[in-house]
Image (cartoon, rainbow, N blue to C red):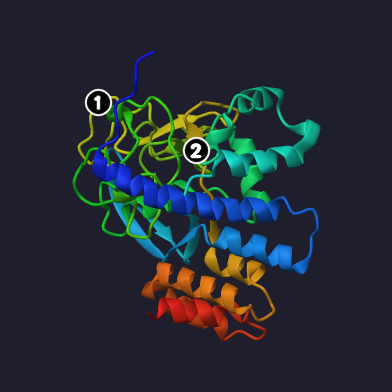
């Protein structure tokens, strides 16, 4: 069997830092999920563990010029919370076990082959229906194509999540020759400004609808996966230089029942609705408060006005005070 080429040294250092952070957050989440007792403390730990894996994306708009359609604007009307990482195998298996005998036999057969040390690899081989069900189980949903493109391109319509120029060794695409997924968060240099990882490469990601195409047909019931995978060569998320037979978008249309070893998911939620539902009503302990402050600092100053607005609501969670303190640093 052909040996995969080694990851460049700079990428390996980034891998260690970010994959380690992803594993630490994932472990905290999974420990909370596996608690037999549904105590208030366990519920609070589960909620915080999940929130810590989210990135804040402000509202905004991205406009793209598509052949045969002119300029198409995708607007995100309200701030989003977005999975910083693709949903992992470890997270997926917790959900799959909750399905019991209703889990699809072909999915169970596939996931039974996942090795014990691949828990932080992205989940794959899940259908669109199953991906939607997972998102609902954590109080979230799949992103629309417009939301996904705004998360990846930003209001500047950047061609890559990391900036304006193509780079190698910042995403798990075909050029690396790995021919498999890697742990989520491995490529620090390939993240977006909002700290969303693996938007290009690793696994393609289900969206809730169909990306606009030059030859789009009415009644097409397929949905799109965006961002490509380890099976695909690196290319811009959006490339205005239209080529015959190729979409300007790094997308492909699939039936909702499709399964592939390089198709997974990432969840999003409306930030206001999600935080109002998930933040605790009790004042957090000091150690937990510090975690909220660290999270607010990671979300940054662009989240401050939004958080301050939530904090003014009657009965607002005391955790918002610590999120605001972190976002103000």
- State which quarter of the image contains the C terminus: bottom left
Residue under circle 1?
244
Q: Residues within 10 Å of mark 1 (few under 14, many from 20)?
A: few
| Residue 237 in sight from this viewpoint | no
179 sits left or right of 32 in the view: left
**Above or below 106: residue 159:** below
- Above or below: residue 163 compared with residue 61: above
Q: Identify which residue, 119 or 302, lies in the foreground.
A: 119
Q: Position of residue 2 (x, y in %)?
A: 35, 15
Q: Residues within 10 Å of mark 2 (few under 14, many from 20)?
A: many
Q: CA distance from mark 1 to mark 2?
A: 35 Å
- Front in this rendered view, residue 183 or 247: 183
Identify the residue at horizontal 45%, vertical 50% (top origin). 20
Residue 71, given in percent of the width and then of the height, sits at: 29, 50
Residue 105: percent from the left, percent from the top?
71, 23
Q: Secondary structure at mark 1?
A: loop
Which residue position holds label 2? Answer: 121
SS of the residue under disc 2:
loop
Residue 139 image position (x, y, % from top left): 64, 56
């Amino acid at each position: 069997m052909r040996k995969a080429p080694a990851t460049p040294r700079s990428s390996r250092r980034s891998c260690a830092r970010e994959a380690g952070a992803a594993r630490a957050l994932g472990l905290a989440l999974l420990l909370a999920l596996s608690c037999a007792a549904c105590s208030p403390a366990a519920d609070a730990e589960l909620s915080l563990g999940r929130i810590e894996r989210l990135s804040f994306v402000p509202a905004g708009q991205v406009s793209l010029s598509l052949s045969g359609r002119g300029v198409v604007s995708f607007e995100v009307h309200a701030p989003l919370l977005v999975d910083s990482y693709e949903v992992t195998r470890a997270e997926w298996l917790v959900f799959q076990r909750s399905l019991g005998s209703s889990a699809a036999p072909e999915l169970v057969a596939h996931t039974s082959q996942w090795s014990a040390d691949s828990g932080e690899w992205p989940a794959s081989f899940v259908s669109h229906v199953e991906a939607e069900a997972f998102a609902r189980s954590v109080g979230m949903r799949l992103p629309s194509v417009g939301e996904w493109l705004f998360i990846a391109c930003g209001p500047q319509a950047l061609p890559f999540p990391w900036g304006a120029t193509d780079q190698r060794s910042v995403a798990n695409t075909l050029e690396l020759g790995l021919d498999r997924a890697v742990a989520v968060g491995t490529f620090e240099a390939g993240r977006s400004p909002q700290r969303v990882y693996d938007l290009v490469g690793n696994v393609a990601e289900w969206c809730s609808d169909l990306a606009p195409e030059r030859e789009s047909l009415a009644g097409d019931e397929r949905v799109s996966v965006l961002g490509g995978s380890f099976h695909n060569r690196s290319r811009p998320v959006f490339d205005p230089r239209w080529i015959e037979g190729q979409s300007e978008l790094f997308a492909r249309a699939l039936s909702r029942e499709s399964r592939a070893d390089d198709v997974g998911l990432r969840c999003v939620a409306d930030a206001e609705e999600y935080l109002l539902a998930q933040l605790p009503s009790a004042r957090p302990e000091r150690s937990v408060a510090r975690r909220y402050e660290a999270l607010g600092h990671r979300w940054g100053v662009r989240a401050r006005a939004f958080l301050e607005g939530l904090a003014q609501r009657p009965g607002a969670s005391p955790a918002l005070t610590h999120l605001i303190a972190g976002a103000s640093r």
